[in-house]
Image (cartoon, rainbow, N blue to C red):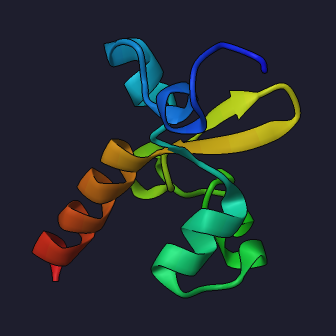
Amino acid sequence: MLSGPSLAEASEPKNEFESELQELLTVEEVAAILRVSKSWVYEHTRARGTPRSERLPYIKVGKYLRFDARALRAFIQKKCQAM
């Protein structure tokens, strides 16, 4: 029998940094949360004359886009307050 961390222990963050990394969302997850298409998410990360403060905040990991869940929540709250 193999000994080591259980599946539950392996999925639990060991420190604050690891916990924050688990908060990174994929394009698909952001699209599902906002109930929009993936192309909408990509479109709203690009400049094209839009100030950076108005774009979806993202982190580039190689060629992949990731979204910090806290930054996404702040972006949504900001948009709600502007209405």
10 and 16: which one is in front?
10
Q: Which image quadrant is residue 62 in? A: top right
60 and 50: which one is in front?
60
- Most extreme residue toward the right is 63
Residue drawn where x is 78% and y is 21% of the image: 1
* Residue 51 coordinates in the image, percent (x, y): 47, 50
Q: Is residue 78 above or below residue 24?
A: below
* Residue 36 coordinates in the image, percent (x, y): 60, 85
Count the marks: how many? 0
* Residue 6 coordinates in the image, percent (x, y): 57, 29
Q: Is residue 8 above or below residue 81?
A: above
Q: Is residue 27 above or below residue 60?
A: below
Residue drawn where x is 19% and y is 65% of the image: 77
32 and 65: which one is in front?
32
- Most extreme residue toward the left is 81
Q: Is residue 74 left or right of residue 37?
A: left
Q: Which image quadrant is residue 78 in? A: bottom left
Q: Quadrant of the C terminus?
A: bottom left
Residue drawn where x is 39% and y is 27% of the image: 19
Q: Is residue 71 left or right of residue 80?
A: right
Residue drawn where x is 25% and y is 52% of the image: 74
Q: Is residue 34 left or right of residue 66?
A: left
54 and 60: which one is in front?
60
Q: Is residue 6 left or right of residue 16?
A: right
Q: Which image quadrant is residue 7 in? A: top right
* Residue 59 coordinates in the image, percent (x, y): 60, 33
